[in-house]
Image (tube, rainbow, N blue to C red):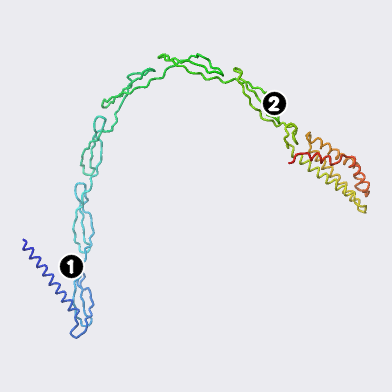
Amino acid sequence: MKKAVLVLVLLLVAGLAIGCRDNADEKSSHEEIAADGHQHKYEGVVTTEPTCEKTGVKTYTCSVCGTSYTEKIDKLDHKYTEKVTKEPTCTDKGEKEFTCSLCGKTYTEKIDVIDHQFEEKITKQPTCKDKGEKAITCKICGKTSTEVIDNAGVAHTYTSTVTKQPTCTEEGERKYTCSICGNTYAEPIAKVAHQYEESISKEATCSEEGTKLLTCKVCSDTKTESIPKKDHQYNESITREATCAQEGEKLFQCAQCGTSYTESIPKTNDHTTRFGTCSRCGTVVTILKDNAVSIQSYFAKGIEQLNKALDKTGEALNSSNYRGAASAITSFGLSAGQFQNAINACGDYPEFAGIKEQLTIIHSAITNTFSGNLTIYGDSRDLATLRTMMDTMIATTPNIQNIQGIMSSWPAF
């Protein structure tokens, strides 16, 4: 056997050597220069197309002298398409066929079996006493196996019964029994609370705690507890009235034990004035500030109009003096109106009574001076007479500085 293999190998090597020499000779003959000395110029053309079953041929021809030679073209690869001819199952292999679209050659391959498609079903539930069981069945081929279900961790099904009732002196007992396997255990039941009845041994007051005795009606156990002090029953009285200058004081005294304490009463706002300085506490009060501002404004406008009237009566006599007289009388009238506005702003407040009196005198003097004479002097050219009347009026009324002095004592705002 070994000799046959060796001979076969030697023959194969010799054949390869001969083929290589022929190819070398053929190639060198193609490249040689022709007898007439020209260089061959070969052009190749496929003369036989290759297929996946047979080799093709390519012919090279010299364009100068027509000499030719040929070369093989390797076979083409098969172009296979595949098709499943038998579907695999969990028990049998399947099969698929490969067909070459060029030559029609075919071959087949096996398809491995697929996994079982198992479904589980519990056929016996596990308990605290016994293990369970489940069936595992393939829904394709029907193959069946069973598995044990471990019962570790399955809870007992306990029911309880009180075997000893607890009291206020002793614990009770509760017994638990599993209805499946009969396993039992017991737990203590805590003592119940004493059923105390109370009796007062000392009444509590607002100055001292009381005492009560508690006795259990089941076991006669006793204990004492303190009763909190009662609240004081305070009566209150004013010991000092509050004013705007001083806080007041209120006394609280218990009618039972005499205990007392005091509380301060906040200062009041009942100042002696609504505008100015309170004579009791010295606080500057400006509740009537808006009225004071109006009085000042109207008074200033009245003085302004009065000065305009006096200025007109001081003009030199000429053909138009009657206009000056009319203008003076008009300003005098406007002055009277502004003083009336100032009087109205004083209202009935006693804080402005003094200045209201002074304003009223001036207003009366202006209106009385021209009462019934406004028309006469409005058309007259006798400014001197008109000036005399105004000077007389001013001389017989209090000095305007009296009003200005009163207002200068008002608080700044």
Q: Is residue 30 above or below residue 126?
A: below
Q: Residue at x 82, y 36 (%)?
A: 354
Q: Residue at x 66, y 26 (%)?
A: 249
Q: How crowded is the residue under tag 2: few (<14 C-alpha within 10 Å), some, or many (20+)? A: some
Res 274 → quadrant = top right
Left or right: 297 in relation to 192: right
Q: Nearer the viewer, residue 372 or 394?
A: 394
Q: Is residue 14 above or below residue 230?
A: below
The image position of residue 302, as x and y in percent, is: 83, 44
Q: Is residue 238 above or below residue 139?
A: above
Amino acid marked by disc 2: Glu
Res 18 → quadrant = bottom left
The image position of residue 124, as x and y in percent, is: 24, 33
Left or right: 209 in relation to 170: right
The residue that mark 2 highlights is: 241
Q: Nearer the viewer, residue 197 or 401?
A: 401
Q: How crowded is the residue under tag 1: few (<14 C-alpha within 10 Å), some, or many (20+)? A: few
**Mark carried by residue 386:** none
The image position of residue 317, as x and y in percent, is: 93, 52
Quadrant holding the N terminus = bottom left
Q: Nearer the viewer, residue 100 or 352?
A: 352
Amino acid marked by disc 1: Lys
Left or right: 93 in relation to 341: left
Res 366 → quadrant = top right
Dot placed on the residue nearer the N-terminal end, 2 or 1: 1
Q: Residue at x 93, y 48 (%)?
A: 384
Q: Judging from the image, what secondary structure is the residue with disc 1 in? A: loop
The residue that mark 1 highlights is: 54
Q: Circles 2 and 1: CB distance less than 8 Å? A: no
Q: Residue at x 94, y 46 (%)?
A: 385
Q: Judging from the image, what secondary structure is the residue with disc 2 in? A: loop
